[in-house]
Amino acid sequence: MGAETQNKLGLCDTDLLRDRGVIAGVWQEADSGERFAVTNPATGAVLAHVPMMGAAETARAIDAASAALPGWRARTAQDRATLLLRWRDLMLDAADDLALLLTLEQGKSLAESRGEITYGASFITWFAEEARRAYGDVIPSPKPGSRLITIKQPVGVVGAITPWNFPNAMITRKLGPALAAGCTVVLKPAEATPLSAFALAVLAERAGIPAGVINIVTGDPVEIGGALTASPIVRKISFTGSTRVGRLLMAQSAPTVKRLSLELGGNAPFIVFNDAEMGPAVAGAMASKYRNSGQTCVCANRLFVEDGIHDAFVAELRAAVDKLRVGHGVEAGVNQGPLINRAAVEKVEELVADALAKGATLVTGGKRHALGGCFYEPTILTGVTGDMRIAHEEIFGPVAAIQRFQGEEEVLRLANDTEFGLAAYFYSRDLGRIWRVAEGLESGMVGVNEGLISTEVAPFGGVKQSGLGREGSSIGLDEYLEVKYISMAVG
Ligand SMILES: NC(=O)C1=CN([C@@H]2O[C@H](COP(=O)(O)OP(=O)(O)OC[C@H]3O[C@@H](n4cnc5c(N)ncnc54)[C@H](OP(=O)(O)O)[C@@H]3O)[C@@H](O)[C@H]2O)C=CC1
Ligand SMILES: O=C(O)CCCC(=O)O
């Protein structure tokens, strides 16, 4: 890419903008020479053209990761940690550029992008530290003259497939533990947001992470996913994205019996009981619902508000929503960027139209924003009921869909009436209820009196059809390690 194109985006370090995949340390085009455009969802402007790779390039990337594996896993955990921390430092030094690139290709506000870069880097720090604590066990033997021990070893080559809603942090949440454990990776970032992935690879190279440890292929998701899952060399698939694709990857991984981490769709309930403190409940709903314009898998998807507090809560939520500022993420003061593409806007429109046709009430918003393109107005609907699509499907947009309820029993039944089980939130000041509801919710994560619960130190993941495994936390490293049991006769 020419220096002029790179400079156009306003990066200080123009070398961070790349437009090729990387295999065995070599930045390269697709075999066919074909490319596809990466656009800014706020303006439609083309940011870059990147390679349309497929099965053949993926096979070479797998071979590169396999060739790099013996050297990488043989290093000490301390050595890998040193390189990872150097990579982390470079990310933080380049935070402004990484955030700008992220906002340009994904749309979220610069403030949110900066937050994501810090959050993304935190996974590298955490797993660099955890790498040195991949302890095994000594097991008291049931027979004399024998010693039983376990050791932990890297799974091997990992295929990582990541989504567009967190173009930085979903990569570091997978590559941090994979590399720390001693695995090598073939990464397929989302079609909409490959530039953040390439920038991370540039920094990894500068940090001294050897060629072949991180390989990136962009292009046809079916071909790339097919090649990764079919390969007997790839021992694990780590995926974040829709439940539909997660199911597919699980089925495709069956013939080679791969390890799987699947972080899939959510339908988070956000429950406000009569005894909740109003201020924090509204602030939590704003954070949980409107972060990233509603495009996270842990966003409040269904808000259940108890009868006695319902009208006051809706009024306060509306006051807060009406203060949101929609616009291009790079503009000062904007906190609601565009949705990722036209299809996302159309899906939100369909869900809102279906709800209104079935009797929901529009409190505010409810249509495309005057800015046009991919912008949608922050919206509140009340009177939502279980027969509406919006109560069952992931909205992935800035729409608060509010249902009224009476009592703990009813709301637990409603909250659990979904095939998903990722995050759930509730607000109450009753200690007994807090325990009962936290235990009764069918979800992998629960926020009690808070709407933002993600952190690198805690296990992130779901139950039911929201996925398998956990990312972050000490458990997150185990997802990339195999336990080997060694039994020794010592005479
Ligand atoms: N859990 C979460 O965080 C996310 C949930 N979603 C949910 O999914 C909906 C659709 O979003 P979408 O971006 O289409 O999600 P997808 O699940 O389609 O995309 C996620 C990743 O999977 C890749 N992918 C798509 N099809 C295949 C395949 N057959 N084999 C292997 N990889 C594949 C995508 O590639 P490519 O980009 O090239 O298509 C992307 O890298 C959203 O509206 C939301 O409801 C979406 C993103 C994240
Ligand atoms: O939407 C996702 O897939 C991840 C949510 C971001 C986070 O809170 O970690």
Image: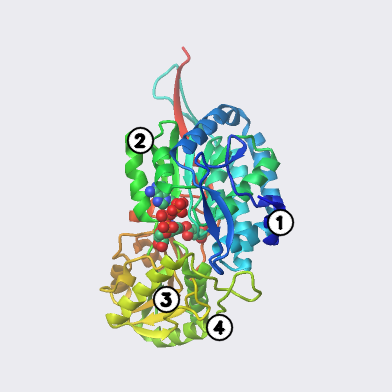
Give percent across and percent down for residue 455. Answer: 55, 57
If you read the primary sequence from the N terminus, does the residue marked by circle 4 or circle 2 appear first? 2
Give me the residue at 58% from left, 43% from top.
130
If you read the primary sequence from the N terminus, does the residue marked by circle 4 or circle 1 appear first? 1
SS at badge 3: strand
Instruction: Respond yes or no on whether mark 4 lies under 8 Å from ligand 2.
Output: no
- Kindly indicate the quadrant of the structure image that contains residue 436: bottom left
The residue type indicated by label 3 comes to: Ala
The residue closer to the viewer here, 321 or 177, is 321
Q: Which residue is mark 4?
A: 323
Instruction: Respond yes or no on whether mark 2 lies under 8 Å from ligand 1.
Output: no
If you read the primary sequence from the N terminus, does the residue marked by circle 4 or circle 3 appear first? 4
In three-dimensional space, the C-alpha distance between marks 3 and 1, rounded to whole angstroms, equals 43 Å
Determine crowd level at label 3: few under 14, some 14-19, many 20+ residues with C-alpha closer than 10 A. Answer: many
SS at badge 1: helix
Q: Quadrant of ligand 1?
A: bottom left
